[in-house]
Amino acid sequence: MRYGAKVLFEDVSVAFVAGRRYGLTGPNGAGKSTLMKIFSGEIDAQKGTVTRPKRMSVLKQDQFAFDAYRVVDTVIMGNQRLWSALEEREVLYSKADMTDEDGIRLGELEGIVGEEDGYSADSDAAILLGGLGIPEELHERKMSELQGGQKVRVLLAQALFGNPEALLLDEPTNHLDLDSIHWLQDFLNNFKGTMIVISHDRHFLNSVCTHTADIDYQTIIVYTGGYDDMVMAKTQVRARVEADNAQREKKIAQLNEFISRFSAGTRASQVRSRAKEVERLEVSDLKRSNIARPFIKFVSKRPSGKHPLEVKNLTRSYGDQLVFKPFSAHVSRGERIATFSAPCSTTDRSPQPKRKTPPSAPAKSRGATKPASAISRRTIKNQSKKAPPPSNGSTPSTPRPAAKRSAAPLARCSSPGKKAPSPPTRSAVAKPPGSSSAV
């Protein structure tokens, strides 16, 4: 399908399976409504064919097309076969003298009415209208007496009437309140036929759709799941293709460098092999996607002053509720400031009494034990002063860390009133076997 030089979709082959509910997505101008009109038969495709089921219902968009009919009759018109039989039956019953042919035809019409559940059509239509928020006192009025939003709801009830095999809905949540949207979601989730819906409400699409048909890359791609599932899968597929293209481009650049270096040398066979590999490594042609990436852009027509904003003694309150106390501030050019606050509460915000801290422990007496680290340092120091020289007259070797390890038990065993045992001397430290006395 084309509009002038713009291609909406081309050579598309897609099947919509019975029992599935499809959401038709794409940005504005992608061709969603055009495709829906092709499905309904309102317009013809420029190329190709469309196979439709026998009973298909479409949400009408013309609010003034049924102004001459009653509200309940407008809903029953959703089943065109039933409505045609009811109208023809009414004409036959209005005749003063019926012929035998009229009697035979009347019997055929009664059979059609029975097949289409026409004897309960009024009550079925009333249930749909009540679920969509149309009060019962409006059911017998003309469509011309209703407001625009009420007309849309009646047209939606018309599309839902008669248990069609396929249901085409274009923006069904317009002019619906929250309760009506929830009722419509429950109704569509219980629908047994094929449904194709267009909506800008992604929460509605996530709740009613089992699959998503997205118009992109000038074709239609069907994804499993709702709108959010489609966006995630679509983004992952594109990211994977872009990463694969980047790897291919890097490999091609390396091969071309090898070819340019050794094309005139003795590696002719290797160069030919690299050239064939370059031809094989083709980068995938990735068309432009219509995924909308939102961004925020502020355009300043001229630069501001050095201090564009300055406040002095600013305060605000609502009655007795103080919003903020007087404060002063200034904003410099280029700064980016976020304003936030805690949720407002009506509870008493009086300061809470401070918790009493427990009394500190009494100071230790002078005879209390000193810290273990001090005892260790003093013990090692005294040990280095009082250690006698070796008896064999040789130069003492450098003390090993065993002396430090011996200080730890002295610190643990010391306590007030007890005298720590004397530390071992240097001569008591064992030398490793085979070590020399000279340093």
Image: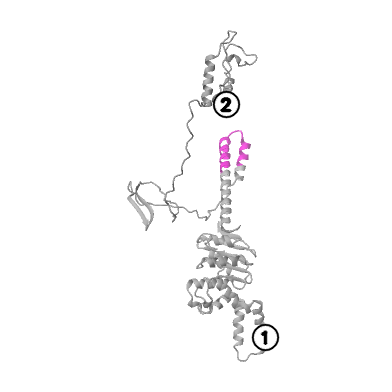
Q: In the rendered image of this protein, does residue 415 appear above or below residue 163?
A: above
Considering the numbered disc 2 on the image, is that residue within a helix, a strand or a loop? helix
Q: Residue at x 61, y 38 (%)?
A: 271
Q: In the rendered image of this protein, does residue 229 appear above or below residue 140?
A: above
Residue 358 location (% of width, % of height): 48, 39
Q: Is residue 315 among what the camera can see?
A: yes
Q: From the image, tell me which residue sits under label 1.
A: 104
Q: Which residues are magenta?
A: 249-275
Examine the image and state in which quarter residue 9 appears.
bottom right
Residue 427 location (% of width, % of height): 59, 14
Considering the numbered disc 1 on the image, is that residue within a helix, a strand or a loop? helix
Q: Residue at x 54, y 20 (%)?
A: 379
Q: From the image, tell me which residue sits under label 2.
A: 412
Q: Residue at x 65, y 82 (%)?
A: 110
Observer-nearest of 198 and 290: 198
Disc 1 marks a residue whose amino acid type is Ile
